[in-house]
Amino acid sequence: DDKASAGETSFWVESFLPSPRCQTDMTIAVRPNTAEGKSWSIQVNGVPCAATLSNGVAVVIVDEVSGCILQSKAFVDWSSVASFLDTVPDGRIVALCSFADDEEEEKKESTNKINCSDNSKFGRLGGFDYDKVTSSPKDFVSFIGRLAFHPTWSSFHVSSESSLMEVSIQFDKPTASTAYKLRSEKNTVPAAVYSRLPDHIMPLNTQLLASNYQKRVAFEAYMEKDSNSSSIVGYTTRSDAPVYLIQNSAFPFRTANGPTQANAESDDSSWTTYHYLPDAIVPDDDVVEEQNNSKNSGTPNFDIPIADDYFMGLLGSQLLVKNGNSSTPTLLDTPNALTNSRLIALYFSASWCGPCRGFTPMLIEFHNVLKEEVASSHGLEIVFVSS
């Protein structure tokens, strides 16, 4: 989800460090638009990080030492971009792109030129030429460079066609002494999860009952001992839920459905996502401490935090849900119908299919046995897809 104000928008959480433990170089790609969506217009090591406004300018600021994405913003005009860049320190890597709808851009063209016609306002962007932007306001604009520097890899492009711009920047290989720290993002869930914390680190039943501190200890043990952990950038969890590991595909984060940001600070029932950032930008008081009082209910909760729009796009905005012994199903919003699901199965069937008519009653019986005799919160939900 984006946080928006007049003329500006940004991600719910802007800072993100792509795969810190396996990063030896950084690739920044800028393209005016892609089939995947506008957030893919700027990618840092494959991570889509462009906040967008219709006919706006997307700007991403990257730390020149660690490769951490620091800020992801979008602005309605170039004047706002110039004002923002004035607040960014020298040396930061800047990636920006602008793609516009011709009709809407014509309405803003004169305003852009009046507010930001002086090329010196972008003088700190080595290699950027605003005169070319104003001379062809309907073109696609792409730039990758550094503030107050003009490195050999910097690139500036104005074109009437969508084209890919990509640069590669070398970093020193991370060492054991490289300082990274987990930042906690309250009331926040990732765009996708990679897997659950393995049972050999902490069994599932233990995860469901563990405190935040115990989960943190288990996660750190996994990162230290497991050879498959190099691509992991953090984890997400909440009370009564397992520990879900996240990779680069987790970004951009979004706000969780539930308590507000203020209330979530002291509410263990809301999702919290923990992700690695350079130690210098993580507050000293952002720690997980051991507590004697546990708020866990002991009831398993498998509500995996993934973007609701994925299932709404796949299954539609509403589903028919059978309630107990009632023969009349209820129409529910898809996210509510699938809440607390650990595994979602799609069952394709049809009344004209003989084998289906025989198998469907057995599948219903199996699901009922799970719910009534094994565990009411087994986490398996079956969506019936009929022809």
Image (cartoon, rainbow, N blue to C red):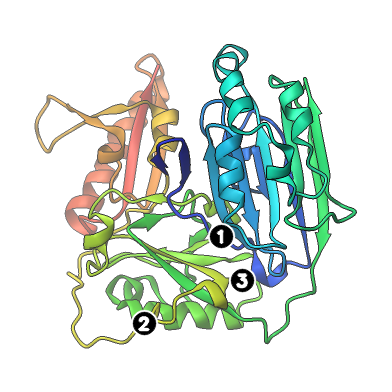
The crowd level at tag 3 (other Cα within 10 Å; few <14, some 14-19, many 20+) is some
Q: Is residue 75 above or below residue 348?
A: below
The crowd level at tag 2 (other Cα within 10 Å; few <14, some 14-19, many 20+) is some
Extreme residue toward the right, this view = 152
Q: Amino acid at mark 2?
A: Gln
Q: Is residue 356 above or below residue 28?
A: above
Mark 1, residue position: 16
Mark 3, residue position: 229
Numbered disc 1: secondary structure: loop
Instruction: Tell me where residue 186 appears, x and y as whole percent.
Output: 34, 63
Of circles 1 and 3, which is in front? 1
Q: Nearer the viewer, residue 288 or 329?
A: 288
Q: Can residue 228 be seen in the rendering of this structure?
A: yes
Mark 2, residue position: 214
Q: Earlier in the sequence, mark 2 or mark 1?
A: 1
Q: Left of 64 or right of it: where is 110?
A: left
Of circles 2 and 1, which is in front? 1
Q: Tell me which residue sits at (69%, 85%) in the image.
A: 176
Instruction: Tell me where residue 334 appears, x and y as whole percent.
Output: 30, 34
Q: Left of 99 or right of it: where is 376?
A: left
Q: Is residue 41 above or below residue 342?
A: above
Q: Specify the quadrant of the image occupied by residue 238.
A: bottom left
Instruction: Assign the C terminus to one quadrant of the image.
Output: top left
Instruction: Tell me where residue 80 appears, x and y as whole percent.
Output: 55, 39
Q: Amino acid at mark 3?
A: Ser
Q: Tell me which residue sits at (67%, 36%) in the image.
A: 97
Instruction: Tell me where residue 56 appears, x and y as whole percent.
Output: 56, 31
Q: Earlier in the sequence, mark 1 or mark 3?
A: 1
Q: Left of 25 or right of it: where is 328?
A: left
Q: Earlier in the sequence, mark 3 or mark 2?
A: 2
